[in-house]
Amino acid sequence: MILISPVTDVHFEGSVNPGRHLGDKTEPASCLFFPANAPMPPTIYILLLLPLFVLLRWKNARKLPFPPGPRKLPVVGNLFDIPTKGHLWLEYDEMSRRYDSDIIHLGTFGTSIVILSSAKAVHDILEKRSSKYSDRPRTVMLGELMGWRSTSLCRPYDDIWKAQRRIFMQAIPPSDVKRFHPKQISATHDLLRVLARSDDIMKDLHTWAAVFIMDVTYGIQGREAEPFLKTAIETLDSVAVAGTPGAFYVDQFPILKYVPEWFPGATFKRKAREWNLLRIEMTEGAYSVTKAQTALGTATECLASIALQQIDPTKDILQQEEFIKTASVTAYGGGSDTTVAALGAFLLAMLMFPGVQAKAHRELDEVLSPGDLPTFSDEPTLPYIAAIIREVIRYQPVTPLAFPHLSTEDDIYRGYFIPKGSVVMPNVWSILHNEEDYPEPDVFNPSRFLDENGRLDPSVKDPISAAFGFGRRACAGKHIALASLWIAAASILTCYVVAPELDGEGEPVTPKGLWYPGPTLFNHPLPFKCRFIPRSKDVEASLEVKLS
């Protein structure tokens, strides 16, 4: 081989101890292949010292403390401190207050769990350092046993995840959400028809959201969608349970995944098998319909049909189709449950805070003509409705404990050591109940988002930024969800007074305002009853004519 000195033009040939001949003496060549009597270049010093620097930094980092948290027991660490029942976000919020820190650390069996409880900590770590914190932790129950690991929800931050994300963003870009407004208005009018005679509000909300998301995702409408709705709703319910941190011990002890179904206490294996079959049915069923319609040229515009038409025939078609399937089912799952929970929270708030509802009615009456229903063009002129939506999202966030991120490198933050492989969970509840950002956070007060002139106040933090995920994992479809929530809320308040149900003596029953006790991934109210009373004869006539 030819060894080239970085300092001189001297060339050494051969592979056995080359040297420079000085008379009849041979001077051994430098092991770095430059003359031994030449000064060593600065770059060589840097290359020599760099490994030492990295090693020292790693050792120093290991000497740094973990963030504050409960005292760790030998072997099991904080196993008994990790909440597994009830509202987990409230437990972590109390823990944050107890240790007076917006970043909390728990560790068990070699796994670090980091809870972030402030907007600043979340921004610093998940936004500014997103290159280190965009992965997902291993989820044995949801990801492996139920098969959701292939979808964007659970998939690691890799090229396949990016391809799935790209499919969604190209098919439904935030700048082009208007083309789905007709679908949203149509679905909302369907909801208005059934509310007045509803005896199960949450069930009707599930149906409304499922029908709309089915249309946007797969282009399947009306009665054609009915065969898929039951499976879709059951599938999403299973995700809400299995996706909750700590819900199943198999996530803490992955070896349990090998326990046979018949083994005592292995009911999770039977559930996983049944829920996996639901996922397959949901993923394949609706997609096959859209694919057939697209091939015939009869498909309506939707995520799946747009993506199918954009397939590159010069690349792996089967792989591209698989990406479309997973992107579609993720979009359906992400959009349906969150919208139901948010609209359920809105209706319960209107029941419990009649003064807010009355003020919203006054704003709608000032803007809309008698008998008219709102459209998206009315949104800029209805700031109080927008403020109500923001307060609903803040007061009872749909995902109060955001889906966890995973760190891919050792990191240091505020002098604390966050090891590679840490599970990082933003406590959205704590962020949106911060007293400095939202005074009296436990009071439902939409006016906190308005200035003295009744316009939206840009100086008040918009809770939407925290409610739909963080960093590169933020919800890609939040613009669709927000538009659906706004048009539904504005339309319901235009048409109806949301009133308490009556007891046997005709007296109003005070709503209790109870929420699903958990643990669950989504925060939603328990089933409740109320009456939807048409606000006037004009509204009643409009409901009969325009919604017939």
Image (cartoon, grey):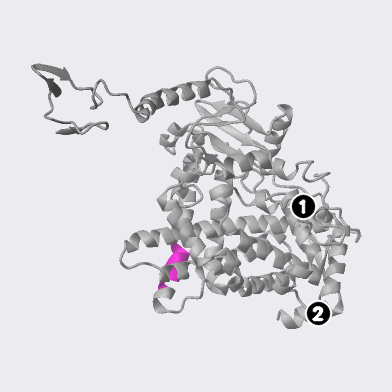
Query: Residue placed farthest to the front in the image?
Result: 23
**Quarter of the N terminus within the rendering:** top left
Residue 371, disc: 2
> Which of 242 and 316 lies nearest the eye of the viewer?
316
Q: Callout 2: 10 Å neighbours few (<14), some, many (20+)?
A: some
Under circle 2, the secondary element is loop
| Residue 117 relative to residue 471: left or right | right
> Which of 307 and 493 lies nearest the eye of the viewer?
307
**In this view, the mark in front (1 or 2):** 1
Residue 314, quarter of the rendered image: bottom left
Location of residue 117 with respect to 302 vertically, above or below: above
> Which of 334 and 43 lies nearest the eye of the viewer?
43
Instruction: Residue at 40%, 35% (x, y): give it.
Output: 258
Instruction: Residue at 78%, 56% (x, y): give it.
Output: 348
Residue 459, disc: 1
Q: What residue type is labelled 2?
A: Gly
Q: Is the magenta stretch mostly helix, strand or loop?
A: helix
> Which of 179 and 50 lies nearest the eye of the viewer?
50
Location of residue 137 with respect to 353 vertically, above or below: above
Residue 392, disc: none
Which sits earlier in the primary sequence, circle 1 or circle 2?
2
Measured in 3D between alpha carbons, the distance from the residue under mark 1 to the one under mark 2, in whole angstroms, is 36 Å
Residue 85, quarter of the rendered image: top right
Q: Give how far across and how far down residue 437 sits, in percent.
A: 77, 45
Residue 97, quarter of the rendered image: top right
Q: Give how far across and how far down residue 64 sits, in percent.
A: 56, 22
Instruction: Residue at 51%, 62% (x, y): give it.
Output: 169
Under circle 1, the secondary element is loop
Q: Give the range drawn in magenta.
A: 281-292
Q: Which amino acid does label 1 sit on?
A: Ser
Q: Give how far across and how far down residue 252 sits, in percent.
A: 51, 32
